[in-house]
Amino acid sequence: MRELLLGIDIGTSSCKVSVFSREGKDLASETEKYDVSYPHPGWAQQDPLDWWNGVCRAIRNILSNTDISAEEIKGIGIDGQSWSAIAIDRDGKVLFPTPIWMDVRADDICVELNRRIGEDKIFEVSGNALQPSYTTPKVLWYEREYPDEYKKIDKILQSNGYIAYKLTGAVTQDVCQGYGWHCFDMRSGSWDKEMAKELGIPLSFLPEIVNCDTIVGRVTKEAAQESGLMEGTPVVAGGLDAACGTLGAGVINNGDTQEQGGQAGGMSICTDSYHADKRLILSYHVVPNRWLLQGGTTGGGGVMRWFENEFAGEERMREKNGSPSSLVQLNELAEKVGPGCDGLVFLPYMSGERTPIWDPKAKGVFYGIDFSKTKGHFVRACMEGVAFSLRHNLEIARNAGASSDVLRSVGGSANSLLWTQIKADVTGRKIVVPASDTATTLGAAMLAGKAVGLYSSYEEAVKLAVKDIREHEPKTADKDSYDRAYETYLSIYEDLKELMQRS
């Protein structure tokens, strides 16, 4: 009988479930979509039960439509989107729709806490600036807006922690996702009781912290009935989607860097020592004794999904008549436009912006429109704008003492040769692309493999399971064009940010 591993990814627009061999071969994958609700400006929320139901459907589809049996799955790893605030009562009932990573409704709470406690004091403990996207202010928003329901909270879970709970009944907090809390000591990986008290976070809300490759429990009878999994299958805690994608890309050593091309954009630089900068994000890696200094932006692959949805009706019609996919057609249009987009520059601040500007009121902007601009210019400007945000974050990280020469790119955006080459040219860094569509679920599965003994070490796991498929060297001939456009990119925000605050 084969010994297989299952990885679960709780993304923003969908969940993905993949089954891997020990050698990292993707034997089967299923994706289930779900909605994000935007009921008010600055809000973005989801129902965690939609995640669970999607996971169960995906697993059942795999087991029904392939020769994979539940008995062959030896371990389950879970990764999930960041900064959830899933409030459950003693019976495990979810009390509120959970604000997700792009939600900034609690901005005023952050302003008050930073004033009362002090930005520097909070940062010294957590290694992260207190911003509305994080878990901390969302929980305090519950207290202010829903005081009666707030009293029913037993624990606050992260996205992967919630799925682990549904699978096993165990209530845990993995060390990697601890960075969502500002009472989490980023140096020691433990809860800081004094800071929790100052922030007003009850210690009873905080689950036990465990390593990401810890087996937190086994699939219960009820979960087995819902999902089709075998009762008793080991489940590990898992961690942040970006961190699991970082592992799945082979990033485990100091200086190794993952470039993220999913719904969100950004990068994760692996370090073996503590490096923090208020403009960036610091978390633990899912690999023990490592940190990740991250840039996390709201505009990544989601920018192209938005553009395709709103402006590619003609391309979708052609696709129905046998042409390549609408995204491939848009890519072909962008290839006809030169570097720098003839002066068209895009700010990809589509839901405010996170690093490095931390401005929940930042807006997406196209600058340089005139009668000469075509649809291809706009597509390429979207790609270049995301690349500029990546460069911005890398420059800040370098100033904080963390730099790298090679980026390992994962996520759907890495499937675009043009977009990946643009990122290489804009950043001046070589980009290596492993199996981009499966890196995140692979990383989650690798955690499970290490836990159940299919890998003796993470070095062995990477050597066996991570396969590079192509490389992109930066083109120096395009450097001047991109440097000019990048300076314009930085100037546009600086010139408009005061105006953005009024809207």
Image: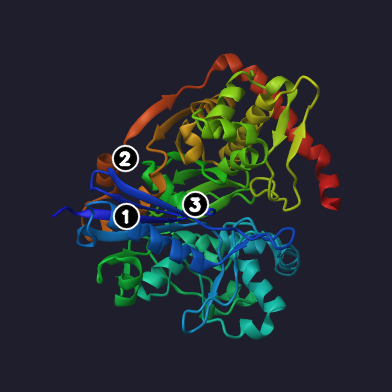
* Label 3 crowd bin: few (<14), some (14–19), many (20+), radius 10 Å: some
Whole-angstrom CA distance, mark 3 to mark 2, is 27 Å
Chain-order first, disc 1 or disc 2: 1
Seen at 27% across and 54% down, the residue is 5
Residue positioned most to the top: 477
For discs 1 and 3, the disc positioned in front in the rendered view? 1
x, y percent for residue 102? 63, 55
Chain-order first, disc 1 or disc 3: 1
Give above or below for 43 relative to 345. Answer: below
Give above or below for 95 relative to 187. Answer: below
x, y percent for residue 6? 31, 56
Contact (CB < 8 A) between labels 1 and 3?
no
Chain-order first, disc 3 or disc 2: 3
Q: Which residue is label 1 attached to?
A: 62
x, y percent for residue 285? 43, 53
Seen at 26% across and 40% down, the residue is 463
Seen at 64% across and 36% down, the residue is 313
Which image quarter: residue 64? bottom left
Question: Tag count in the figure?
Answer: 3
Q: Which residue is label 2 attached to?
A: 466
Q: Is residue 484 visible?
A: yes
For discs 3 and 2, the disc positioned in front in the rendered view? 2
Numbered circle sitting on residue 278: none
Give above or below for 437 relative to 406. Answer: below
The answer to whether residue 61 is left or right of residue 87 is left
Query: Could you tell me which quadrant the N terminus lies in?
Result: bottom left
Amino acid at dot 2: Val
The answer to whether residue 470 is left or right of residue 424 is left
Could you tell me which secondary element the residue under label 3 belongs to? loop
Q: Nearer the viewer, residue 99 or 472?
A: 99
Which image quarter: residue 347? top right
